[in-house]
Amino acid sequence: MSTTLFRTLEMLRHVPREPRKITTSELRDRLAAANFDVTLRTIQRDLQKLSTVFPLVSDERDHVFGWSWSRDAQIETLPGMDAATAITFAMAEEYLRDMLPSGVLELLDPHFDQARRVLDATDNGLNTWKRKVRVLPRCQPLIAPDVDPKIAQAIYQALLNDCRLNAVYRPKGREPREYFLSPQGLAFRDAVTYLVASHRDYDNVVMFALHRFVHADVTDAPARHLPGFDFDEWIRRGGFDADRHGETVRLVVRLDPEVGEHLYETPLSDDQQLVRTDNGHLELIADVKDTHQLRWWLRGFGPDIEVIEPIEIRDWLLEGARRQISRYVDSHPAS
């Protein structure tokens, strides 16, 4: 290949899709970084020629002249996308779409489209892979609450660019109030998406469900980085169960074998002990964090489990069972 062809391919690689654009000066800097020494005039001339063959558009509305791929242009990568890459894009579109900022999705949409075309034309098992693979929740699936797309876009943009948010948020069961938020992270739990953020100059972080935002605007103010805050560590310490504090407890339970056998293959903790008792039950001993998620999990076993320790969780489950029995008795009293 000639140097001109290599330079042209490198130049096309740096042209973004509408509404983003790149100037000829920026392209010259990108090409210089790739060891192509070329003038602004040559770049402009090349782009004018390429726009007669490729769906390239120029934007002269602002003082800064820029070039873009047309918004609806089909992207044909060089070399062409193979089937393995196509199925990766297809699975990413299926399971990661809600986790990506809208700006990233706009950039990926052409690749998603190309992946579908590649898989439709592929004559092997990969073209049916997407139809044969599913990710299933273990709990009862819930319908996700509606989130205003403009609010979601503002929140994602603020998180992506480390900017603060001016927001109006309606806490559960209370009236809306204004917040000045520094986003720290985004978490997806069951059907709800949460923004983890600090308010004004406070050092503590709070969870905000995206569907409860009434309004959100991105500001130019940089987000406040909390000293020593680590998102993963905050989650491990039970951040999503703040009212329980996620304290580590020694859990001792007895289970019916039919519902506990899976714990041999999928342990509850690294130090789990699971033994069969003389009466045929399974006894589980594990050091775990006392969280809402743990308690819901234990409650889900119903009559097939007995918590021995800690006594606090045992009493909590016992009180819940009493209330449940009382509801049934009160609604259908014995004749």
Image (cartoon, helix red, strand yellow):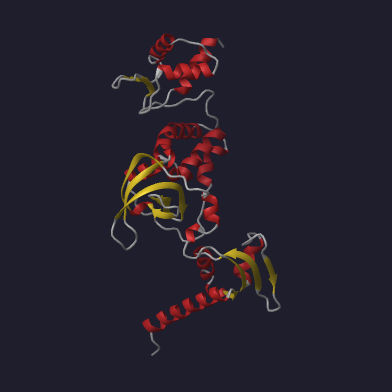
Looking at the picture, tell me which residue is in the foreground, 303 or 272.
Answer: 272
Q: On the picture, is 285 further left or further right than 92?
A: right
Q: Is residue 89 above or below residue 7?
A: below
Looking at the picture, tell me which residue is in the foreground, 2 or 314.
Answer: 314
Q: Is residue 310 above or below residue 82?
A: below
Residue plotted at (50% across, 42% down): 91
What percent of the width, then of the height, locates residue 167? 32, 48
Which residue reaches farthest bottom? 335
Residue plotted at (38% across, 49% down): 200
Tell me if residue 134 can be seen: no
Counting labels gives 0
Looking at the picture, tell me which residue is in the foreground, 80 or 298.
Answer: 298
Q: Is residue 14 above or below residue 283?
A: above
Q: Quadrant of the C terminus?
A: bottom left
What percent of the width, then of the height, locates residue 109? 42, 34
Residue plotted at (65% across, 69% down): 285
Q: On the picture, is 291 further left or further right than 104?
A: right
Residue plotted at (51% across, 43% down): 130
Q: On the picture, is 91 further left or further right than 183?
A: right
Q: Quadrant of the N terminus?
A: top right
What percent of the width, then of the height, locates residue 154? 35, 42
